[in-house]
Every structure is written in structure tokens, then in C-alpha cells.
Image (tube, rainbow, N blue to C red):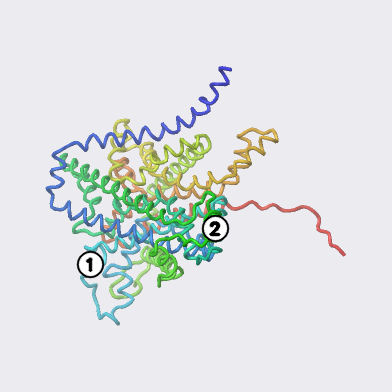
Amino acid sequence: MIALARLPSLGLLTPALLALGVAVPMAWALWTVASQALDAQAWQALWADPQTLRAWRMTLWTGLASTVLVWLTVARLLASAFIRQRLGRWLAHLPALLATPHAAIAIGLVLWLSPSGWALRLLSPGLTGFDAPPPWLTTQDPWGLGLILALWLKEVPFLLWVAATQLQREDVRRRWQAEYTLAQTLGRTPQQAFAQVVWPQLAARLRWPLLAVLAYGLTVIDMALIIGPATPPTLAVLAWQWLGDADVATQAQGVAAAWWLTFTVLMGGVVTVVVLRVVASTRSFASRGSCAQRQATEREGSPPPKTSPWLVHFCGRLPLQPNVMWTTILASYVAVWFALAVGSVSGVWPFPNLWPELFTLGAWQQVAQSASTVWTTLGLAVASATLCVAWSLAWLELAPRRWQHALQPWLLLPMVLPSVLWVVGLYSWALHWRLEGQWLGLWLAHAVMVLPYVVLALAPAYQAVDPHQAAVVASLGHGRWVYVWRIKWPLLKRAIASAWAVGFAVSVAQYLPTLYVGAGRFATVTTEAVTLAAGSQRSLMSAYAALQMLLPVLAFALAAWLGRPRRFASNAPVTSTP
């Protein structure tokens, strides 16, 4: 009896170790940075610096504006996709969009929007009369418009993909479709039915992904260095510059700026949650069996429940059609890919010539000579993605559901807290354990940043598996792990492969962890691309940015091949009936 009583505790030992394996390094990193935040002189220096307030205002403007645009765009696209059943067709393009890293998007936009870029070359000299690039601030503009555009282009596919993982859950899809149909039978238009029934429930499930979008917009560094404003820069860039200074007092000022960014993100998160709850309060139909009661209320002649007028208007009456919005996003990505491809093989290219006078593979030859950079990128991406997928599978399979809900905010902290804050803590952790400048330490730092995205990608599909399948397998005399290995995970192989590809892409895009924890001893395609973006080597910069995009594309292609459905050939003879 004593042995039987101990079985549950033994069963919880593995998930407890998994949780500790993630929570301890994160807690160490946060505690280290928190201890550095108590320097009063650093805070005084922060607010005495004339750049701080201007940089903070620019951060609020670019981060909030891009997040609002992303949210409204995704709401419009999802309304059309749900009503007109277009989601599957749009999802076919998402892997290529998700595989394009942030830095590659920014570099591609610079190649188009700079004074010597493709946009002015197409118009010059015929329409503009320019024989030389004009002194225009079309990139790194003081209003942050280029950064807002880049963030909007990159974050819309991410949030749309996360929403699609919810809409593709069979249990959720059937319930929402039934409620949507019932709403229409009660006199609602398709747009009203979506706004009143589906969207409030879906918006609540997008809370953490939206907070990740907001946090990234407020704290992004690599994109801000490439296409963001320079006078003043965003507060994240300013904190990064201070942290890289040799003066200890200036480094402490950078830590204080990182904590102020964290406070900004938290306040933005609180506002976001409040707004989402206000939107959810407009829901006219509950999802737990109250539809019949509302139908009876309608029959008795009661007034129809109210919804937010702007939400209905936005879901169905905006002049910009979803097809136009989606086509604009796709065309922008194609333009970026095209600019990177041409730029990587361009030689002499005077303005205003539309095409280079000389095409050369010199940039790619230099990339080939730096094969160690490519192999370092591949090794880190494969290792971190594999580790995070293995951890996520073990956690989702073994941990009780209440543990998963309790640890979820902790797991998602690297997504919603400033990366510049994390890397300071991770660097201190690596320094204490003598992992600074070591491949193992850099791998673990990448894994910490990759894990939230893998869990976010895998959890919806994992939780949607019908639990009755395990009971059926048990009734046939097989154990739990036979069910997991032979039925559950094979059914989830598409989701597992997609989560691995997402983790691979996130690792390839890591910039700050590579710089800090790697201590300058490891170069990746991302660090090379961002560094070259500050110079004048357009062809080499384009080559590294194109390679940064190509590696995740190959990972998503591999995931699509591994996740393809099994085909069974029938060996039964075909008989014809007279």
C-alpha cells in the first residue's frame, strides 16, 4: 500500500525536474539583473541624460503603433477567413513568411526605401529628375515609420499563424462554427456573428501572443539598428549602447534603462489585458451552453444583445478588403526576397540605373569562405530547436494540466520581457558557471529564447488530442507509452515538425544572446548581417541576409516533408461489376 501511495509522487518527479531545469536559470538571470537595478546613481544618470525621454517616447510610438496595426489587420483577415472559409488557402503562404527573419525584412526594406534603393530607381530620372540619390530620410527616419512598417510586416504572419492554430483545433472549430451558425439563425449578419461570437473568444486566446508582439515592438534592437530612427534611437538601442560601454557607471545606466523598458512592457501588457477583457465583455453568446437560453430570449421579443459598433464596422465594412491587405503583405515579402537576391549578386551599380552594370558572385564566395559562421548557425539552431521540442513534448505529456497553466507565464517570460534585460542576466549566469564564450553556454542561451515559441506552437495541437484514444488503446491491453509512440506522436508529427521549424527560425534570428553569451567568439549569419547593415557593402550584406532567410525556409520545407500525411496503398484486387 505504501508503494502504491508513492506512485503519483514518482510520476510527478520528471515534470518537476523539467520545470526546475527551466525555472532555475531564468530565476537566476532575473535575480542577477534585479540586484543591479537598485543602483540609485544609475537611475539618476538615466533621467539626467537628455536622450532618455525622447528615446522612450519614440519607443512608445513605434511599439504601440505597430502592435495596434498588427492587431487590427489580423482581426480583419481572420474575420474574412472565417466567414469565407479562406484560412486554409492563406495558411499555405505562412511558412515562407514566418521563415523570413526580422533582420532580413529590415535589410530588404532598406534596399527598397533608401535614397538609392529600388523605389527611387524605378521612378528616376523620368518622373523625379534625380541623377543622384536625394538627401532624404526614407530609412532611419526620425518618425519611426520605417520601423513601424517592418514590424507590421513581420508580426502579422506570426499572430495570424498563432490564431490559425486555435481555429484548426477540431473541438474549438466545431463549437465556434455551431455558435456562429446559431447567431446567424437569430438574425445576425455574418460580420455581426463573427464579431459577437467568435472574435471575443479567439481574442482571449491570443492574449499571450499579442503581449509578445507588443514586447518585441517595444524592445527590438536588430531591426531598430537597421531601419529604426537614429536621432534619437529607441530606448532599447540606447540601453544596448550603454551596456556595451567600457565604463561601469554607463553599464549600470544601461541596466536601469532595461528595467525601465521592462516596466513599460508590463504597463503595456496590463493595458492590453484590460482592452481584451472589454472586447470580451461585448460577447453576446457564451460558449458553455447558454445559446439555447439566448434563443428563447429572442423568441420572447427581448432586444438583441449589444456589441461594440466599431468592432462590427471593422469586421465587415472597412474599405480596404482582406484580399488587398493579404496581397500587399505577400507582395512586400516578394519584393524583399527579390531585393536580397539581386543585391547579393550585384557589383557596380550607379544611380539611377535600374539594374547593376555587373553581376558577380563575389559576395557569396566570401560567405563560402566563412563556412564556420554558417555551421555555427546551423549547429545552434538544430541543437536548440531539438532540445526545446524534446522538453516541450515531455512537459506536455507528463505534467498535470494545472502545472502547465501555472508555469505558462514563466515559460513565456523571454517573449514578453526585453531581450536586452534577459541577455544581461544570462551573461551573468554563464559567467558564474564559466560558460561565457563556450558553445554549451551559447546553446543554452539560445534554448531559453527559443523555448517559449516552441511551447506556444505545440501546445494547442497537443491539447486538442482526443483523450478517449488513450482509453481505447488501454482497453486493448497496451500501455501508455505504446499509445504515445505509436498513435499520439505520429498523429502530431505535423505539429511537432512545425514547432521544430519555428524553433530553428527563432534560433537563427538571435542577435543579442550570440553577442553577449558568445562573448564575440562566435559569429552567426544574423550577427554578420546586422553588422554589415551599418556599412556600405551592399552585396555582402544582402548575401548574409538572404542566407539568414534561406536557412529557415529550408527548415520549414523539411518540416513540411516530415509532417506530410501517410499514404496507404490498397493491395486489394479491383473487381468490376457487370
Q: Considering the image in quadrants, where does the N terminus appear?
A: top right
In this view, the residue in front, 109 or 75, is 75
Q: CA distance from mark 1 to mark 2?
A: 58 Å
Q: Is residue 320 left or right of residue 423?
A: right
Binning the other alpha carbons within 10 Å of mark 1 as few (below 14), some (14 to 19) or many (20 upward) gives some
Task: In the displayed orientation, state which residue is furthest to the bottom.
Answer: 126
Q: For the point 26% across and 64% down, which residue is it?
A: 139
- Which amino acid type corresponds to the residue marked 2 in the rendered image? Gln
In this view, the residue in front, 397 or 353, is 397
Task: In the displayed orientation, state which residue is furthest to the right.
Answer: 578
- Which amino acid type corresponds to the residue marked 1 in the rendered image? Leu
Q: Secondary structure at mark 2?
A: helix
Q: For the point 48% across and 32% down, which residue is it?
A: 15
Which residue was labeled with disc 2?
A: 295
Rendered location of residue 184, percent (x, y): 54, 64
Residue 143 figure quarter = bottom left
Q: Secondary structure at mark 1?
A: loop
Measured along the vertical axis of the image, is residue 81 above or below residue 173? below
Rendered location of residue 137, percent (x, y): 23, 67
In this view, the residue in front, 321 or 281, is 281
Disc 1 versus disc 2: nearer the observer: 2
Q: Is residue 361 left or right of residue 537?
A: right
Q: Earlier in the sequence, mark 1 or mark 2?
A: 1
Which residue was labeled with disc 1?
A: 137
Q: For the point 39% across and 45% down, which residue is it?
A: 376
Q: Is residue 297 left or right of residue 469?
A: left
